[in-house]
Amino acid sequence: MNRTVALRDFGFNFLGPICSEYLHALEQLCQSESPRKLVFLAREGYFLEQVYQHLVSKGLMSSYPAAYLNVSRTFLFRISIADPYTWQWSLYHKYKGTLADLLVGRFGFTLSQLASLFTEEELAVNYELPAQGGDLELVLSQHLPALKSMVQESRNAYLDYLQSLGIGTTDTPLMIDVGYSGTIQKMLTRLLQCESQGLYFITTEDGLHDIEGFQASISSVFKTGVRMGDGYLMLDRSLFLESLLTAPNGQFVEIGRMSELTEPKFHFFYGRQTRTQSHFQDLQVVFAGAQQAIEHFFRHRIRFSTEEIECMYQQYVTKRNLLPRAVCPLFDVDDVISGNGNVNPLQLFGV
């Protein structure tokens, strides 16, 4: 089969139905809640924002003010490290290694920055999370003023960037992402001190989450009340979906200000690329097929049940013969949050 045709057909058949149903759910939520701002979170929101704008241009979805937001857990963990309230999210995710590797991999600090704050002995101590989260809290507490000073410039620039996009004013932003625990939404709610909504493919817990007086409303499209390893395949093997729903760049790691005389006012720095980014021209063909499918489904009012989506997903992520050879290099995800580097779901799950 022609390579381009194989990639396009894969996008049509794999991404098309699942993203179509997600966008239908987004339309329904918007009609009931009338959000003032749709916020498509990097990087999974990259394709979703593009196809949303396409459907709006075709008159197939309602138009709302929307923005694509450069954001990542790593960046938010770093600029919020001097806020102990956020440690519940940054220090209690599975990890095993040295303090230096944790602060570089999960928080995005440089070794030179760390050397100015911690002793060599402190940086060399090994920790296992979440079990030793309390020990790490004690260590960080001893350096709070210095940590706050180190991240303040980035934090202020990012708050200005959010304001420039109209995010975090009196309106409640609706955040659009794959999921699953809503960590980025909760971190942004804390950072902005505002109410927020989030719509996800799958969630660990739907409902209202109190972030010290501000409500983060989380809802799912396909499934809620499940955690990684529970046996729900769409979550346990979600790396296949996350590999494809990505942007051309690596993980967002830093923001800087441009001269006041230039536009735009900010420039962004990204981490290393995965194989998916280096083959992004192929991923764009997959996106084109998916967009064609979604437009077709919307135009002809074709819907899929959750059971149909789950069945389709299971077939693709368990049977190698359903994956065209051309798409295999696109399955690559960076997992620096857990200290694992890049992860290939085909190898990880033995597909």
Image (spheres, rainbow, N blue to C red):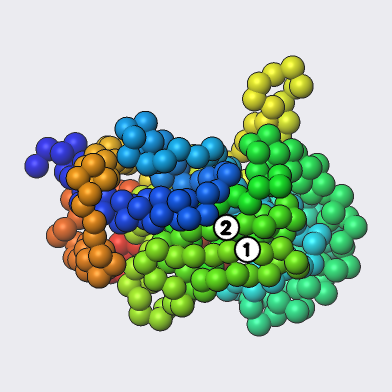
Number of marks in the rendered image: 2
Q: On screen, 106 above or below 203?
A: above
Q: Secondary structure at mark 1?
A: strand
With 141 as the anchor, is 345 left or right in this view? left
Q: Residue 258 appears in which quarter of the rendering? A: top right
Q: Residue 56 appears in which quarter of the rendering? A: top left
With 220 as the anchor, is 20 left or right in this view? left
Give the amino acid type for the residue marked by disc 2 in the picture.
Answer: Gln
- The residue shown at (71%, 44%) is 169
Label 2 to label 1, Cα distance in Å?
6 Å
Q: On screen, 62 above or below 313?
A: above
What's the mark number on residue 102? none
Residue 146 picture location, percent across and down: 88, 55
Q: Which image quarter holds the N terminus?
A: top left
Query: Disc 2 marks which residue?
Result: 197
> Are the two marked residues, 2 and 1, in contact with CB atoms closer than 8 angstroms?
yes
| Crowd class of label 1 (few under 14; some 14 to 19; many from 20; radius 10 Å) | many
Give the amino acid type for the residue marked by disc 1 in the picture.
Answer: Ala
- The residue shown at (34%, 35%) is 59
Q: Residue 322 appears in which quarter of the rendering? A: bottom left
- The residue shown at (75%, 22%) is 259
Q: Residue furthest front?
A: 32
| Crowd class of label 2 (few under 14; some 14 to 19; many from 20; radius 10 Å) | many
For the residue pair 101 and 335, the one nearer the viewer reads as: 335
For the residue pair 338 and 225, the one nearer the viewer reads as: 225
Residue 39 picture location, percent across and down: 55, 46
Query: Disc 1 marks which residue?
Result: 216
